[in-house]
Structures are given as C-alpha cells and as structure tokens.
Amino acid sequence: QLGLFTYDPGFLATASCQSAITFIDGDAGLLYYRGYPIEQLAEHSDFMEVCYLLLNGELPTAQEKKTFETSIRRHTMVHDQLHNFFKGFRRDAHPMAVMVGVVGALSAFYYDALKITNAEHRAISATRLLAKVPTIAAMCYRYNKGLPFMYPRNDLSYAANFLYMMFATPCEEYVPNPVLVRAFDRILTLHADHEQNASTSTVRLAGSSGANPFACIAAGIAALWGPAHGGANEAVLKQLEEIGDVSQVGKYIARAKDKNDSFRLMGFGHRIYKHMDPRAGVMRRTCHEVLTELGLHNDPLFKLALELERIALEDEYFITKKLYPNVDFYSGIVLRALGIPTSMFTAVFAMGRTVGWITQWNEMISDPQQKIGRPRQLYVGPVQRDWVPLEARD
Ligand code: SDX
C-alpha cells in the first residue's frame, strides 16, 4: 500500500522511483496529471495551465496563471550568441540533432550562479527551459529552411507564438488561426508527461549526479529521438505513405504479425498501455477537428489511419498482444495538417515533454533522500581467467 494506491509486489520490484506527478493504469487506459484525467485537461485546460499544474501540483488561480505566463513570456528570447551556435550545423542537419546541441549549449549560458539545491534556482531553470525550447525548436526549422529567425512575440499565447516563430515572415502580418492554435496547444498537453518513460528516466538518471539541468534536458531530447519512442510519429507518417492505400492494409497487418519479419506497425503498441492509450483518442478527435477546419476531412492518410485502426482492433493477433494505437499514431497526421514537416515532429514532442522532464527532475532533486542513480546488472560474461601472452595465443 503506497498512499492511496495498492501495488502488487512484482510491480513494486520494477519501480525505479516514487513519484506524485503522473499516474498511468495501462490495463484500464488511464492517464492522470496530478490526479486530473488527461481527457479533462485536454478539454478544459490550456498548456500553460497544465505546465503550472505539473510543476506546482495544483491548478492555478487566475492570478497565479497570469503571473506564471508572464514569467514564461519574459524569457522566450535566447542569448544572441546562441544564434552563432546554429552556424556550426549543416543546413540539412536533422532538427533533433540541432535541438540536442543547442539546448545542451544553454548549460554554457546558465551554470555559474546555478545552485540546483536552491528551489528558486530550479524554478528559474524551469522557466527558462519552458520559455526557450519552443524558440530553439522554431529556430531549428528556420535554419534548416534558410529562413530568418523570427523573434518571439509576447502578445501571443505559448502555442500561437511557436506557430508564429515557425511560419511568419518579417515581410507579412501573421494572423494565427484560433482553431489550429487550440489544437496545437492540446497536442502539447497530450505530450506533457508520461511517468518514467525512456527519456524521462534518462533525465532523472543524468540529473541524479547533480548535472546541469539544461544538459539533462538535452539528454532527454537525445533519448526521445529514437523511433521506438518519440521518433515514432515521424515513422508513422512514413509508414502510412508507404502503405499508400486501404487495399494494402491487410498486407502490412500480415507483416506485423509475421514473427520472421521485423516490421512493426508504428504508432501501435506500448510498454504500459494494454488498452487504448487515452491520448490516442483525444489526438484522433483533434486530428478530425483540424482537418475539418482546413477543409481536408477527406485526407487520404487520415482515412487510411482510421481504417488501419479499425482492422487492427478487430484482428486476433492485435487483440491477443493487446496492441492499440498510442499517442504517436494520429499525431503525425495532425502535425502535417498544421504545416509542420515530419522532421520537426519529434521536436514538437520534445517541446510538450520538456515540462514533464523538468517536473520529474525537480521532484528528484528536491528529495532530501535523493542519491545518484546506479542501476545494477546480471553479469553473463566469462568467469575469471588469466592473461595469455601474445605469442601463446593461437
Ligand atoms: C512512446 O514509455 C512511454 O511512455 C513512451 C511514450 C511516452 O509518452 O513517453 O508513450 C511515447 O514512445 C509511444 C510508443 C511509440 N513507439 C511506437 O509506436 C513504435 C512501435 N511500437 C513498438 O516498437 C512497441 O510497441 C513498443 C516499443 C512501443 C513497446 O514495445 P514493448 O512493450 O517492449 O513490447 P514488445 O516489443 O515486447 O512487444 C510485445 C509483443 C511482441 O511480440 P512477441 O515478441 O511477444 O511475440 O507485441 C509485438 C512484439 O513483436 N509488438 C508489435 C508491435 N509492438 C509490439 N507487433 C507489431 N507492431 C507493433 N507496433
């Protein structure tokens, strides 16, 4: 019995830490941030409110939210020297490679006065990361396209500001579409935290040594990049384009079931969810909302994804293996509809997950019992043996 929850001993043995941030019940398909169901937060909160909730443990009052948003807005610009950092990358560098480098470089700008044992210093680091990661992500896109960097605008919401920095030009006025902004804001909420996933565990392990928090978040970005994790949304879209047509779905489902074929349906399956990922349902509805707003409700890839989900959910193998769509299955389609290129999909995931990484890092660092992480192993190598001189080796 841990607080309000009862765990079986087998599960307790696998737990890497105790946390009060995010609760997942994979069998029931439940996801709560600080006790609030993700469906309610996606429906009623905006991302700034969700960030406040994750970082502080409670929903903000109107004044608390206003103060929080103002503190974020005041740190959205990056040090001008950081612009030069981009020049070291080839224009065609993957945005995630650039993001890992540039976010890590923030540790070179904020280190001397930073005492991570000081709660105020940790809060300032959190504010700076939340504020600057969207600016850096947009800069990665602009650099890749050879477009001038757009400075953030403090009159826009967090989500609208990112879309502005991505798609505006100095030559024309940019008027964000409120339906698309709300959808993008909700996508950030869906990605905000997910307890001890691979990238969050990376941030916790790196942070447990007392490393600079900006460098720890860069480590999380690196882990998220993998196609089995945050890179799956980019892989889903490529896979849907490869499948091409509903008539081909059966062939790919058969490949996914073939033990001799390493092919996997990207966006399907999850280490924890053995039921529908609750984020996938919200993402599907958001996808439909955006496509409808843009007059793309007959988008062939969306139709293909819906049919793939329908067929897979009726298939014996997928039912037995408990393989359901996860958060990445529809996110690529909606991000593409928003005009975001596939190469930026994981960068958007990183933008949403930054608040989760910071919150988990902060929970660990502020625990007075906290020690450096030191996972152990089962050794399966050679037993002890003596050295053999070169001439005696055949
Ligand atoms: C994210 O951890 C998190 O919380 C991550 C995340 C987050 O918010 O941080 O939720 C975000 O990473 C979502 C997952 C995105 N990745 C993908 O969509 C890639 C495709 N999915 C698979 O690679 C896989 O499902 C994983 C990696 C997500 C989970 O793999 P597991 O839990 O290690 O499960 P497994 O590989 O042991 O699979 C169990 C069985 C296997 O068959 P058997 O060996 O038991 O016979 O299911 C099969 C697998 O072959 N299987 C699939 C499959 N996923 C698992 N078969 C076909 N297609 C798939 N997608």
Image (cartoon, rainbow, N blue to C red):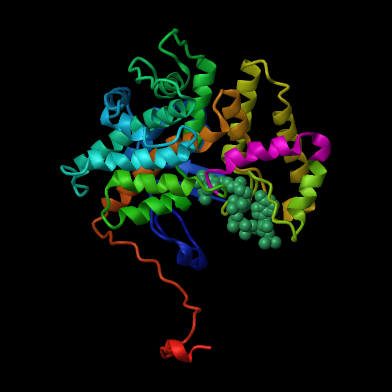
Question: Residue 346, how many percent across, how many down?
Answer: 51, 38
Highlighted range, magenta: 229-248
* Left or right of residue 99: residue 126: left
User: Is residue 322 visible in this depiction of the protein?
Assistant: no
Q: Which of 100 and 352 is in front in this view?
A: 100
* Left or right of residue 209: residue 28: right
Question: Residue 216, how many percent across, how many down?
Answer: 34, 48
Q: Which residue lies furthest to the right in this view?
A: 247
Is-magenta flag for residue 247? yes
Q: With respect to residue 361, does 145 lie above or below?
A: above
Q: Nearer the viewer, residue 95 or 296?
A: 95
Count all numbered tags in the image, as a single digit: 0
The residue positioned 51% from the left and 67% from the top of the image is 10
The residue positioned 57% from the left and 47% from the top of the image is 227
Q: Which of 392 and 123 is in front in this view?
A: 392
Is-magenta flag for residue 65? no
User: Is residue 302 visible in this depiction of the protein?
Assistant: yes
The residue positioned 73% from the left and 22% from the top of the image is 298
The residue positioned 70% from the left and 52% from the top of the image is 263
Q: In which quarter of the image is the N terminus?
A: bottom left
Question: Residue 382, how many percent across, how many down?
Answer: 49, 83
